[in-house]
Image: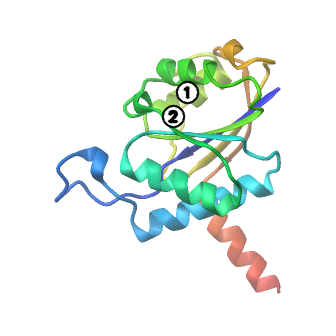
């Protein structure tokens, strides 16, 4: 079994004033979402060994914040094709991951991430009506031994958690103290 955590980049600045969409940075809220996603990834267990990210600034900032929050020396691979990638292209990227990696994190964009979850879990990129908001964390267990075996229907959805739910859970824990 391989573990795949998908994180949609944190909330980004609006496109006004930026020469291209790829140059949009995270907002303060976006950095908070990235830290929360990393904290949740730790709580769910199974140490991360590799982070793959889009070259877009907001995705790179998310990946750097995740790695920093995980407090580990995790390699971050900037994969140019993650930006605007289809689900099929994202699956192809996963098939090329090193075999020594048992848990990878993929940080990217919609609609590719939503379609990837649908394809891996439901067998078709358009079968689930899934909406991944910014900062959302999706954890999948893939019923494969080797990354090259990634195919539609090989995934089991373990967790789908929004930043709002993470914040609510944190507030409840603080009140109980």
Q: Is residue 159 above or below residue 29?
A: above
SS at mark 2 in the image: helix
Q: How many marks?
A: 2
One can see residue 135 in this view: no
The residue where tag 2 is placed is 113
Q: Which mark is residue 124?
A: none
Name the residue at 61% across, 19% down: 96
Q: Could you say which is closer to the camera, residue 21 or residue 173? A: 21
Q: x, y percentage for residue 37? A: 62, 56
Q: Quadrant of the N terminus?
A: top right
- Splitting the image into 4 quarters, where does residue 14 fall? bottom left
| Side (left or right) of 164 relative to 14 | right
- Splitting the image into 4 quarters, where does residue 174 fall? bottom right
Mark 2 Cα-neighbour bin, 10 Å: few <14, some 14–19, many ≥20: many
The residue where tag 1 is placed is 116
| Side (left or right) of 82 relative to 94 | left
Q: x, y percentage for residue 129? A: 53, 33
Q: Is residue 138 above or below residue 87?
A: below
Name the residue at 64% across, 23% down: 120
Q: x, y percentage for residue 52? A: 56, 38
Name the residue at 62% across, 18% down: 95
Q: How is the image coloured?
A: rainbow
Name the residue at 55% across, 60% down: 65
Q: Could you say which is closer to the camera, residue 31 or residue 166? A: 31
Q: x, y percentage for residue 15? A: 23, 54
- Splitting the image into 4 quarters, where does residue 177 fall? bottom right
Labels 1 & 2 near each other (Cβ < 8 A):
yes
Q: CA distance from mark 1 to mark 2?
A: 5 Å
| Side (left or right) of 63 relative to 44 | left
| Side (left or right) of 130 relative to 172 | left
Mark 1 Cα-neighbour bin, 10 Å: few <14, some 14–19, many ≥20: many
One can see residue 70 in this view: yes
């Amino acid at each position: 079994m391989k573990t795949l955590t998908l994180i949609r980049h944190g909330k980004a600045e609006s496109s006004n004033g930026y020469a291209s969409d790829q140059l949009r940075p995270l907002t303060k809220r976006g950095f908070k979402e990235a830290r929360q996603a990393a904290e949740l990834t730790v709580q769910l267990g199974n140490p991360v060994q590799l982070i793959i990210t889009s070259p877009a600034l907001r995705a790179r900032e998310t990946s750097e914040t995740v790695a920093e929050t995980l407090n580990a020396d995790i390699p971050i691979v900037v994969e140019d094709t993650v930006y605007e990638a289809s689900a099929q292209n994202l699956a192809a990227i996963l098939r090329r991951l090193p075999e020594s990696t048992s848990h990878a994190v993929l940080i990217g964009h919609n609609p590719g991430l939503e379609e990837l979850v649908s394809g891996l879990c439901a067998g078709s990129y358009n079968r689930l009506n899934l909406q991944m908001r910014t900062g959302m964390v999706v954890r999948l267990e893939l019923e494969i031994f080797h990354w090259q075996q990634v195919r539609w229907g090989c995934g089991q959805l373990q967790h789908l958690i929004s930043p709002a739910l993470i914040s609510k859970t944190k507030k409840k824990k603080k009140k109980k103290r």
